[in-house]
Image (cartoon, coloured by chain):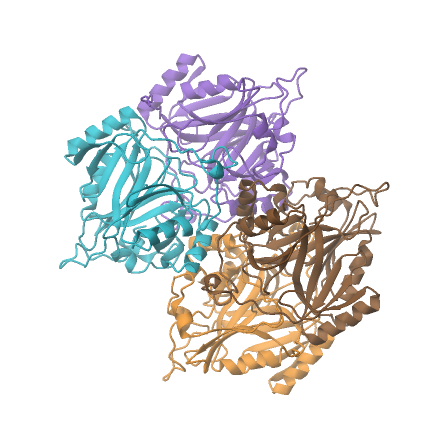
Chain colours: A purple, B cyan, C orange, D brown
Amino acid sequence: MTASPERIHDIAHLGSVELLTPKLDRSLWYFKDVLGMEVVHVDGQSVYLRGYGDHAASALKLTAAARPGVGCISWRAIGAAALERRVKAIEATGQGLGWIDGDFCRGPSYRFRDPDGHLMEVYYEEQKYVAPDHLRSTLKNLPMRYTAKGVNVRRTDHLALLARDVPANRAFAQTALGFRMHEQVLFEHGTKEIGAWLSPSIVHHQVAYVLDVKGGSGRLHHFSLWVDDRADVLRAAAILAENGIFIEAGPSRHNHSQGFYRYSYAPGGNRIEVYSGSYLVTAPDWEPVTWNEEERGTGVYWGTPLPESFLTYATPDIAAEAAPALKVPVFDPG
Amino acid sequence: MTASPERIHDIAHLGSVELLTPKLDRSLWYFKDVLGMEVVHVDGQSVYLRGYGDHAASALKLTAAARPGVGCISWRAIGAAALERRVKAIEATGQGLGWIDGDFCRGPSYRFRDPDGHLMEVYYEEQKYVAPDHLRSTLKNLPMRYTAKGVNVRRTDHLALLARDVPANRAFAQTALGFRMHEQVLFEHGTKEIGAWLSPSIVHHQVAYVLDVKGGSGRLHHFSLWVDDRADVLRAAAILAENGIFIEAGPSRHNHSQGFYRYSYAPGGNRIEVYSGSYLVTAPDWEPVTWNEEERGTGVYWGTPLPESFLTYATPDIAAEAAPALKVPVFDPG
Amino acid sequence: MTASPERIHDIAHLGSVELLTPKLDRSLWYFKDVLGMEVVHVDGQSVYLRGYGDHAASALKLTAAARPGVGCISWRAIGAAALERRVKAIEATGQGLGWIDGDFCRGPSYRFRDPDGHLMEVYYEEQKYVAPDHLRSTLKNLPMRYTAKGVNVRRTDHLALLARDVPANRAFAQTALGFRMHEQVLFEHGTKEIGAWLSPSIVHHQVAYVLDVKGGSGRLHHFSLWVDDRADVLRAAAILAENGIFIEAGPSRHNHSQGFYRYSYAPGGNRIEVYSGSYLVTAPDWEPVTWNEEERGTGVYWGTPLPESFLTYATPDIAAEAAPALKVPVFDPG
Amino acid sequence: MTASPERIHDIAHLGSVELLTPKLDRSLWYFKDVLGMEVVHVDGQSVYLRGYGDHAASALKLTAAARPGVGCISWRAIGAAALERRVKAIEATGQGLGWIDGDFCRGPSYRFRDPDGHLMEVYYEEQKYVAPDHLRSTLKNLPMRYTAKGVNVRRTDHLALLARDVPANRAFAQTALGFRMHEQVLFEHGTKEIGAWLSPSIVHHQVAYVLDVKGGSGRLHHFSLWVDDRADVLRAAAILAENGIFIEAGPSRHNHSQGFYRYSYAPGGNRIEVYSGSYLVTAPDWEPVTWNEEERGTGVYWGTPLPESFLTYATPDIAAEAAPALKVPVFDPG
C-alpha cells in the first residue's frame, strides 16, 4: 500500500442554493406551508428560507424569474485560509468571476461558473442564525424549534446538476473545490461517464453531475432537503398528495446513496427531493463505487422503475436538440 | 471576524474497539445472534466481528478477560502523512507507547494511552473488507449484505469513556488527535467540566469523556452501534426484551446529540447502545453547545429520567471510593 | 369443546368523549394546534373537535368546568334494534337515567351511569361528517384531509377510567354494554381485580377500568388518541416537548396491549395519550390474558419503569383519603 | 333515518389459507427464512406455518402441486351456532360440498366453493397455539416470541381472489358468509363492478374479489401478511431484494385501504404482499367507498403507477383467452 496523497478539505458544506421560479407566490407556499420551511428575510424579488436544523440563517433563496432553474450555488469554506486556497484554485481554471460583497448574512464571496455554466460562489464568513423567542427550541443544540408545519424539512442536503460534459465538471469539482467522488455511472464499457456523486465531506454527496441528455447547459436536475427519518419521507408523500403537488417518484430508495426519497415539482417547475437515510463515507481510501448500464437500468434493489421524465425533465425545460447528446437507458440520476 | 485557525483533520474515524468480557461465549451470542453482527475472524481468545455496513474487515474485537471493560481503541488516520503528524503530536504529550505490527487486517499501529489510562492506537493501512459470495449484497455500495438476523446493527458509531479528569482527557483528544468538541457539560457555574463530546469529523461524536463519579480510571461507559432508523431502535427494544437481555434505558432520545437510543448490558457486563439519528456538525465555526446542571438534570426534552445506574455503573465495575470525585445530579452521559 | 354462548355485538365503537377543563382556551390550543385536531362546532362553553380520520362529525367535546375530568362518554350502537337491547339491559341494572334528544350531530341518546358514577350514553343515529371543500382529502376513503398540523392525531381510540370497585364496573360493561374483556390484572393470588381492558369489538380495548388507589369515584385516568405509526408517536414526543407540554411517560410500549404510547397532560390537567400499534383480538374464544403483581411490576418488556404519578394522578385530582383503598405496587394502567 | 337491518356477524376472521406451489422447498425457504414464519407441522406434501402473532396453531398451509395458486381458504365462525347458521346459508346457495373432519388443529369443517370455484370452508373448533419453551414470548399476550428472523411477519391479513363475475362472488360473500363490503370499483358509469373489498369484521378487508381480465376461474391475485409498522414494510423491501426475490411493486400505499404494501412473488409463483397500516371500519352505517376509472387510473395518491403485470398476472398463470373478459385501464386490485 502506497501513501495516499493528502486529501483536500477546504469546503465545509453546501451553504445555500438559489432557486429561480416563475411563480414566486406559489413556490413560497410550497416551501413554507407544504415543506414547512421558515421565511427569514425578503429582499425585492427574493425570499430567504431555512429548515429548522440549518445552521446558517438561510439555506434557500427563492428568486422570481422568467423560467425555473438554479441561480447561485454557495459553498462555505472551513476558514479564511481555505477560502483563499479555493479562490486560487478556481482562478487557475479560468472559471473565476470575481468577488462580491456577499448575500444576506454572508461575508465576501468569490463567484465563478462550473464548466457547464452553473453560477457558484465560495465564502467563509457567515452570520450564525439566532432564533427569535417564538422559534427557540427547547433543545439547546437545535438552532430553531421544530414547528410541526407540513413536511417540516430539517435542512438542505444536496443538489444534482445536469451537464453536457460530466467528466469536465466532475474534474473541476475535484480540482477547484477539492471534492471527492463517492460514486459514478460509467456506460459503454467504462468509457462514457454519465454521472458523478461528489462531496466536500463524509456526507454521501452534496452535488451530483449527471449527463444532460438534451444537450442543454446550466440546468438543474433537483434540489434535495433532508428529513431525519424514512417515516418522515412517507409522511411527506401524504402531505404532498393532499396538497395537489405533482409527484414524480417515490417513496423509494436510491441504489447509489441508499437514500430514501420522494420527488415532487415545486409550483414553478423545479424538481424537489425530500430525502433521508443516505450513508456516510468515512473511509479515507474509499474507491468510487462504479455502476454500469445493467446495474443502473434494472433498478433491482427496490424494484420500482423510475419514470422516463426523471431522465428527460430538468429546469429550465428545453426541447430535445436535433441530435441528443447520448442515447442512454433510463437510469437514476437521483 | 478574524481568520479561524486551520482545523486539524488527520483522523478519519473510529476504526475499531476491543471489548473485554468474562463471558466470551455469551457475549459472542449477544453480538452475533441478538445484535446480528458477523464473525470474520477468530484468534485465540479473541473474536473479530463486523456490522454489515462497516467498511473495515472488523470494527469490534471481543476478547476474553477476567473483567469486562474496554481493551484497545483504534483510530484510523486519513493517510500516511496524517498518521505521522498524529504520532508526533502524541509523542509530544509523553503518552506514547510505541509501534506494533498491527492487529487483524491492519498495518503498523502506534499505541498510546489517554491521560485516564485507556489504551488507544492510531494507524492508516487497513485491508478493505471483501464479502464472501454468500454475504455479498445486491447493493454495490454496501460492503456486505443485510442479513436480517436479530437487530442487525449497521456499523460502529462511537464510545463513551469515563475519566477522573475530563478536561485533561478532552484537551488530549483535541491536541494529540485533532478532535473537535461539539458539546459539553459544565457544572458549578461553568467551572466544573464533567462531560465532553468529541469527534474527528462532522459525525456528532465518536468519543465522549464523562466524569468517573467513583474515581476509577480507564473505564468504559458504553460502546455504541448504529442502525439506520429510529424504527430499528424500537425493533431492537423488542428483540433485546425477547432475549432476556438486561435493558437499562430507552428507547428514548438524548438531549445532547439528538440521538435515539436503547441501552442494554452485554452478558459480560459492558453497556451497549443501539443508536440512530444523531445530527451532523457541518459548520466550521461551530461553538460547543454547553449544558449545565439544570438543563441536564431535567431531561425535559423527552421527559423520561435516566436511571441512577446510568451515572454510577461502568466497566469494570468498582465500589465507590471513600470520597467520590464529585457529587453530581443525575445527568445523561450518553 | 363445548358450544360457546353467542357473543353480544351491539355496540360498534366509542363514539365520543367529553372532557372537562378549567382552562378552555389553553386546552383548545393543545388539542387544536399541538395535537392538530379540527374544530367543527362551538356551543356556549363547549367546543367540538375531530381527528382527520374520525367517521363521526365530532369525537371529542371540550367543556369548560371548574375541575378537569371526564364528562359524558358516548357509545354508538350498531343499529336501532341493538340500541333497544342495550337500553333494556342498562335499565335492568338500575343505572339508567333516561333519554335525551342527542348532542351535536346525534340522534336520541339514552343516558346512564356506570357503577362508579361515570356518565355515559348509548345512541345509534348520527350525522356522517362531510368535509368542507378546503378540508376534503384526495383520498376518497378518508373523511377529511390530513392537514399536517402538529401531531395530527387520526382518531379517538379509547379511554381509561378509575373505579373503586373494578369487578363491579367490569361486569356492568360486560352485561349492560356487551363488552368483552381482553386483558386483566389480578393481584393477591388472583383474588384482587385491579384492572380490566374491555372492548365492544376486536379493537384491543376502548375502555379500561383501573382501581382508584385514592378511593375516589367517577375519575378519568386518560383519554387516548390514535396515530397510524410508531414514528408518529416519536414525532409527537418532539412536538409536545417543543410546546412546553408536561410529559409524563413514554415513548414506550405497554405490556398489556402492545400499544406504543406517549402521555402528556393537557393544560386543564387531563392525561392524554398519543397511541399506536395495539393488537387486534380476532379469536372468538379468546381467554383474557391475566397479569399479576410480578408481571406488572417488573415492566420487563421495555424496561423503563412508569413514574409514580401514573398510578396516583387522575382527574379531578384528589387528596389520598385517610385509608387508601389498596396498597399496590406500581403497575401500568395504560 | 330508517332503522338499519341487523348486521350478520357470524364469521370471526380468515382462519388460514392453503397455497399451492410447484417448488415446495424454495417456497418453504421463502416463507420460513425470508419472511420469518415458523414451521409448526409437516404432513406429507404439506407444511403448516404461522406468524408470531397468529392466534391459531397455523394460518398458512403450503402444499406441493403442479401449478401455483390457492387451495382451501378457511373461515372461522364466532361460535357453534354461528357456524350452523353459515352452513345453512351456504347450503341454500347450492355451493355446499359437505363436512370434513378438519385439518391440522381444527374441528369439523364445512366445505364449499364460491361461484368462481375457489375452495373454501367454515369451522369453529380450533386448537389454540401453545408455544414450546424456546418460542415463548416474554409478552404474555403474544402467542409466540418475536424471533427476529428475516421479515418476521406477524400474522395473516387477507387475500385477493380473481373472479369472472365479481358481483356474483361479492353477493355470495355477503349473503352466505355475512361479509360486509367496505370499498368497491365500478367502471362504465357505475354499471361494471370490477372489484369489491369485503370483511367479516371491522378489519378493512379479509377478501377482495377482482375481475379476472383473462377470463380464468379460481385464481389467486395475492395473499397478504401483516407487519406492525410501515417501517417493517420498508425493511421487508431490503430483505426481499437481498434474497433475490422477484419484486413487483411497492413499497407504496394503496388508495383503497390506505394500506402500505410490498409485493413479491414466492418462488412457486404466488404473489405475496407484506402489508401494514390499513384503516378499521368501525361505523355501523358505513357506505362502501366507490371508485371509478378515473380515480383508480390516476393512482394520484402516491403517484407511482402499478406495473401492467399487477393487473394481468395471477396464479395459476394462463394465456389470455381469445376474447378477454373486459378491457380495463390499469387499476389497483391490491
User: On the image, which quarter does residue C297 sit in?
Assistant: bottom left
* The one of A120 and A170 positioned closer to us in this rendering: A170
Above or below D85: residue D28: above
Q: Can residue C251 be seen in this view?
A: yes
* The one of B263 and A171 positioned closer to us in this rendering: B263
Q: Is residue A150 visible?
A: no
* The one of A104 and B293 positioned closer to us in this rendering: B293
Marker count (numbered): 0
x then y, percent, for residue A107: 37, 27
User: On the image, which quarter does residue C188 sit in?
Assistant: bottom left
Above or below C189: residue D125: above
x then y, percent, for residue B315: 25, 52
Q: Is residue A55 left or right of residue C24?
A: left
| Residue at the farthest front position | D44
* The one of D229 and A99 positioned closer to us in this rendering: D229
| Residue at the farthest right position | D323
Above or below D227: residue D245: above
